[in-house]
């Protein structure tokens, strides 16, 4: 970064839209760096370099490394929660299954859009930690809100062998990990699983498989 650009980033008050874009760039860089090396092996200076900003500007927006890690997780989970809640707001007894499938699709598509989040969480899932606790604190409220819809879908004869928790684990395994492990998935299937076409194909395959519907016979 040039000296002139460093001075510009430190002197004067940024317009709100520029500041917001800077924060999004930092979050994107944070997701990439934490996903590549894990929390312990990632430094704020590395993230600042990835975001092409000064270390001081990063600290101005997010403070500590722990604060930034938590902000990265919240950035993605908040978007997923908003999309899923918008579906829940429109649920009726007549569209319960369709709505539940839409919630699953939102989760799968977000996993494809942000595979870095699941790579980050893979580091944390190896042991209990405050950061893993934080993930559950973010995820559990929306998980609990989906639970009544899950019960309605079960009463309609679907997913009889699952609990809400085991179903979520199943969807993580089927719907998120293939994107998180994209290099492996691509090598195995000779494709680009993160491409728009393959993301949609994978989401359709997971939903068709879970709900026992032959591919091409969706409602």
Image: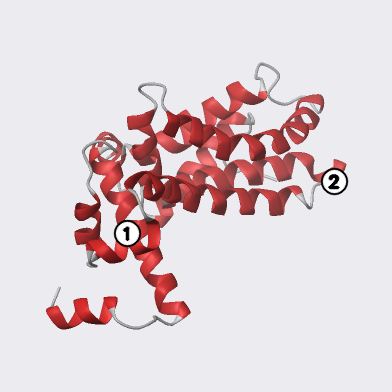
Report the front residue among 44 and 111.
44
Q: Position of residue 89 (x, y in %)?
A: 77, 51
Q: Position of residue 192 (x, y in %)?
A: 31, 48
Numbered badge on residue 59: 1
Is there CB contact under 8 Å for labels 2 and 1? no
Q: Position of residue 101 (x, y in %)?
A: 65, 41
State which tag comes first along the sequence, 2 or 1: 1
Residue 9: quarter of image: bottom left
**Relative to residue 116, is residue 17 drawn left or right?**
right
Q: Residues within 10 Å of mark 2 (few under 14, many from 20)?
A: few
Secondary structure at numbered mark 2:
loop
| Numbered-mark total | 2
Numbered badge on residue 92: 2
Residue at point 25%, 55% (across, down) = 47
Residue 152: quarter of image: top right
**Relative to residue 13, is residue 34 drawn left or right?**
left
177 shown above or below 65: above
């Amino acid at each position: 970064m040039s000296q002139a650009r460093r001075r510009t980033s430190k002197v004067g008050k940024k317009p709100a839209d520029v500041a917001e874009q800077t924060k999004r760039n930092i979050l994107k860089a944070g997701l990439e760096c934490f996903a590549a090396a894990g929390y312990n092996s990632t430094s704020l200076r590395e993230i600042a370099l990835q975001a092409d900003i000064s270390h001081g500007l990063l600290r101005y927006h997010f403070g500590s490394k722990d604060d930034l890690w938590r902000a990265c997780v919240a950035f993605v989970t908040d978007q997923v929660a908003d999309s899923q809640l918008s579906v829940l707001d429109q649920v009726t007894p007549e569209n319960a299954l369709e709505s539940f499938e839409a919630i699953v699709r939102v989760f799968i598509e977000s996993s494809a859009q942000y595979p870095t989040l699941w790579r980050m969480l893979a580091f944390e899932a190896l042991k209990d930690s405050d950061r893993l606790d934080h993930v559950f604190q973010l995820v559990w409220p929306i998980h609990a809100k989906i639970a009544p819809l899950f019960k309605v879908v079960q009463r309609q004869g679907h997913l009889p062998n699952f609990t809400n928790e085991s179903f979520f684990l199943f969807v993580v395994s089927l719907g998120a990990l293939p994107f998180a492990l994209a290099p492996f998935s691509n090598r195995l299937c000779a494709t680009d699983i993160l491409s728009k076409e393959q993301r949609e194909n994978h989401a359709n395959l997971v939903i068709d498989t879970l709900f026992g519907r032959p591919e091409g016979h969706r409602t």
